[in-house]
Image (cartoon, grey):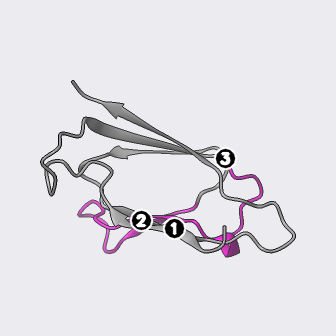
Amino acid sequence: GNGSGYDAHYDNTSHRISTREDLRKLTAILYLTPRWRVEHGGQFRIHNPPPQCASSLLIEPEANTLLVFWSDKVLHSVLPSECPAGTTNHRYALAIWLNID
């Protein structure tokens, strides 16, 4: 809520900008937001979609939506999320990273 979001990033950047090894390989996000509406924001944007897509992809954080992607290959962001005053429509998500050894 209150306009919070995430700028464009990779979940695993060790091969790009860091000297520290990051073992995260796969990201899974389960959206849990009940009664989500477009005006609440919080959409997930993929900035480097597959070649068959002309522009970025926007995924709505509707309840029971599961999103799975490569942690080191998918540039993404989260649009600002709003929770109108007097409501309880917060954005809920469960994120899990699967590591490699």
Q: Amino acid at mark 3?
A: Leu
Q: Quadrant of residue 98?
A: top left
Q: Quadrant of residue 36?
A: bottom right
Separation (CA) of disc 3 from disc 1: 17 Å
Q: Secondary structure at mark 2?
A: strand
Q: Amino acid at mark 2?
A: Ser
Residue at the spot of label 1: 5
| Front of the two marks 3 and 1 | 1
Magenta-colored stretch includes residue 97: no
Q: Where is residue 65? Give x, y as percent.
A: 58, 47
Residue at the spot of label 3: 32
- Quarter in which the N terminus is drawn: bottom right
Magenta-colored stretch includes residue 37: yes
Dot 3 or dot 2, earlier in sequence: 3
Dot 3 or dot 1, earlier in sequence: 1
| On screen, residue 40 above or below 66 | below
Q: Where is residue 92? Give x, y as percent.
A: 65, 51
Residue at the spot of label 2: 77
In the rendered structure, the answer to whether residue 18 lies left or right of residue 29 reads left
| On screen, residue 96 above or below 41 | above
Q: Are marks 2 and 1 in contact (CB under 8 Å)?
A: yes
- Quarter in which the C terminus is drawn: top left
Residue drawn at the location 14% of the way across and 55% of the way down: 16
The crowd level at tag 1 (other Cα within 10 Å; few <14, some 14-19, many 20+) is some
Q: Where is residue 51? Give x, y as percent.
A: 23, 63
Residue toward you, 60 or 17: 17
Q: Residue furthest right?
A: 86
The crowd level at tag 2 (other Cα within 10 Å; few <14, some 14-19, many 20+) is some
Q: Main secondary structure of the magenta part?
A: loop
In the rendered structure, the answer to whether residue 67 lies left or right of residue 64 reads left
| On screen, residue 86 above or below 68 | below
Which region shows up in magenta?
33-60
